[in-house]
Amino acid sequence: MNKPETLLDLKPSPSNPRSITPEALSGLQASLREFGDISGLVWNARSQRLVCGHQRLEGLKRSQKLAFDAERCVVVGETGEWPVRVVDWDEATEKAANIAANNPHIAGDWAGNLDALLDELKAELPDLTAELRLGELAGEQSADKEAEERVELPPPKSAWWLIRVPLSVVEQATPAMEMLENIEGVQVDATVR
């Protein structure tokens, strides 16, 4: 199995159905800075309690036999292994981390491609789609949009255009880009991928 060798190898999936606002990203950054990754099983050595991963652990317990490998600090099941991150936090930090792990305001929103992805999955993996209750997500991106529209944002100060130009027509497009560059306040950046 190949493993990533550099940070650049961790490329985002083009079909990722989530996006995140700058405000939510700022909250997520604060959570990562303060607590690290709290998306898995996190156990507080000081309180001897699970901080995060309550539902994951319950789901695992109800679906398969589990054991704990204390030497490697992993929950071992019939279908895989789940690492347990051990932290040493006071009670207030433990509570804050638990709430942050469940805070929808730093989780991002459904992107515009969710319904198309759900339709694709229903056709390709109907049983799994039903078992995972993915059909219940249909239309949620519009609910996210409605909530976003209710938030008062300052008026935009600029617009960004991302234009993909095939290399075969760069010469034809160059005069148009140069015209844009000559307009006061317009910034044109170019890159090749």
Image (tube, rainbow, N blue to C red):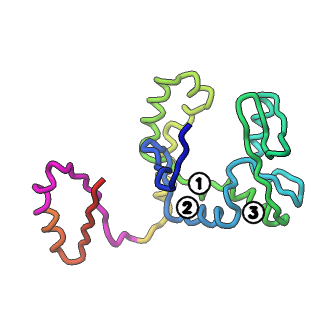
Can residue 142 be seen here? The reply is no
Contact (Cβ within 8 Å) of mark 1 with mark 2 = yes
Q: Position of residue 176 (x, y in %)?
A: 13, 62
Q: Quadrant of residue 104?
A: bottom right
Does label 1 or label 2 sit earlier along the sequence?
2
Q: Residues within 10 Å of mark 3 (few under 14, many from 20)?
A: some
Kindly report the distance in space between the C-alpha atoms of the residues bearing marks 3 and 2.
Answer: 17 Å
Q: Quadrant of residue 136?
A: top right
Secondary structure state at the residue bearing disc 3? helix
Which residue is denoted by mark 2 in the rendering? 24
Q: What's under tag 2, amino acid-wise? A: Ala
Where are the magenta residues, as a range?
155-175
Q: Position of residue 58 (x, y in %)?
A: 79, 38
Q: Is residue 147 above or below residue 139?
A: below
Q: Is residue 174 left or right of residue 148?
A: left
Q: Is residue 160 left or right of residue 5?
A: left
Task: Residue at the far bottom: name it.
Answer: 184
Does label 3 or label 1 sit earlier along the sequence?
3
Give the label on residue 5, or none: none
Asked if the magenta segment contains residue 19, the reply would be no
